[in-house]
Image: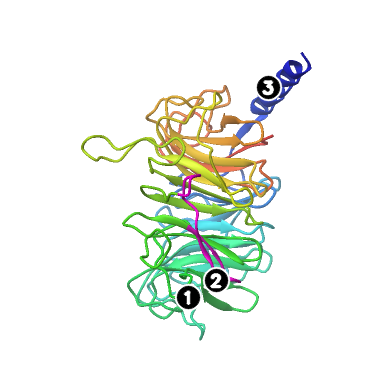
Amino acid sequence: MAAAVAGVVMCAGALEAEAAVQVALVSRTPTGVPANGESTVYGWGGSLSQDGSIAAFASRAANLPQGDGSTFQVYVRNIPGRTTDIASVNNSGIAATSDTFAPAISPSGDLVAFEGLGAGLPQANGNYQIWVHDTTTGKTRLVSADAKGRSGRHGLSLYPTFSGERYVAFESNADNLPGGSGDDSFVYIRDLKLGKTILASKTAGGSPAVATIGGQALSLDARFVVFVSNDPGLPSASIFTHVYLRDRQTGSVELIDRANNGQAASDFSADASITPDARFVAFDSVASNLPGGAPKDSRGDEPLPQQCYVRDLEQEKLVLVSKNNAGAPQNGACFDPHMSADGRYVAFYAHATNLPGGDGTTDEVYVRDRKLGKTVLLSKAANGDPADDDSQYPSISLDGRWVEFVSDANNMGGRPAHSQVFRAGPIG
């Protein structure tokens, strides 16, 4: 009887927490007017500070600071302060004259990293670069720099992610960065304190390991780096991309996307992220031999569903997180899992008919509470209805209470006909 009562209390608490989640528009002017232009670039969302109070996003809206209606700029929204400031500026405060996007914000919210051509920014050279803007000083500095401080050359530098306030990880195929050839992409770490760029994606033997687009992340101390690769020098290499964890102190490389019997994922895995303490790694995969995976059909077509996972490196266990409240794997496709610092909450987006509010065609954003075993719909209108168009690219605050995402929906308070950025919470 006591156990039953406890279960009812836990369930009631979870329902109350779900009801408390509110969705608010982030991509707005300092006076609160919704952005009047697109506030996403395909494949890139925004980023939240540790407590979720500061949000970074990209937009080409004409009614945002220095917006011209065509060039994507990076912005920082202080939610409690109700301010929206531009971050993609040079050291005189003038906006870049070509696109910048893919923002990543540091835990404090003081630093914002982003990518783009960024014409007019320090050392822009016509190639995609990474910059960091300091919101406290107004200064912007180049991140994708070689040993002599020169910009990345003859290649693209992409996908910045922060680790604490000191380190930025990114991918690049620039030919003047360590190990670079101008062809293959590698993962790099920029130490903002030392002003040094370090090759991070390596084999156990120390050779550069090719990294595929997206999916690199660092532990807080930058000792551990996760990346996605099909480099033949890595464990269980195949034509499929796998997720790897490299210990930069010992040089060891571990395969992350493997079943609990030790077998490597049988198909593509991507979109890796890691908790600050390096205990948990999240990723998505279409592999049929991982929990919830489905075999290819008789023609060898890609399987559905694509699932999202978390590997517990302490317990050496792989856990499916893209599942409904009955514990069944979602039956569509799950993408882009991101974790709170303790690994309890995992935000992702999916189109499935067996997740809350899912219709199988529209992407919705969810958070999975791994402690309570509950999946909550976040992309919803004030009346609780699911978002009426795609919602994607979630970012979760390290404290696990807030999730930022992009949506084309018209029923959540954004301006019709334009993608907007929203924040959902508090969670838990």
Q: Quadrant of the C terminus?
A: top right
- List the residue tagged with mark 3: 11
Q: Nearer the viewer, residue 20 or 14?
A: 14
Q: Secondary structure at mark 1?
A: loop
Q: Which mark is residue 303?
A: none
Residue in view at x 44 percent, y 28 percent = 388
- List the residue tagged with mark 2: 251
Q: Amino acid at mark 3?
A: Cys
Position of residue 338 in the picture relative to residue 220 (left or right): left
Position of residue 7 in the picture relative to residue 215 (left or right): right
Few, some or many residues within 10 Å of mark 3 (<14, 14–19, 20+): some
Q: Earlier in the sequence, mark 1 or mark 2?
A: 1
Q: Are marks 1 and 2 in contact (CB under 8 Å)?
A: yes
Q: Earlier in the sequence, mark 3 or mark 2?
A: 3
Up/down of 272 relative to 174, above or below: above
Up/down of 106 relative to 12, above or below: below
Position of residue 271 in the picture relative to residue 31 (left or right): left
- Tell me where residue 237 appears, x and y as whole percent: 37, 60
Residue at the extreme front:
261
Residue at the extreme right:
2
The stretch of residues the image draws in magenta is: 244-262
For the question of whether residue 211 can be seen, the reply is yes
- List the residue tagged with mark 1: 206
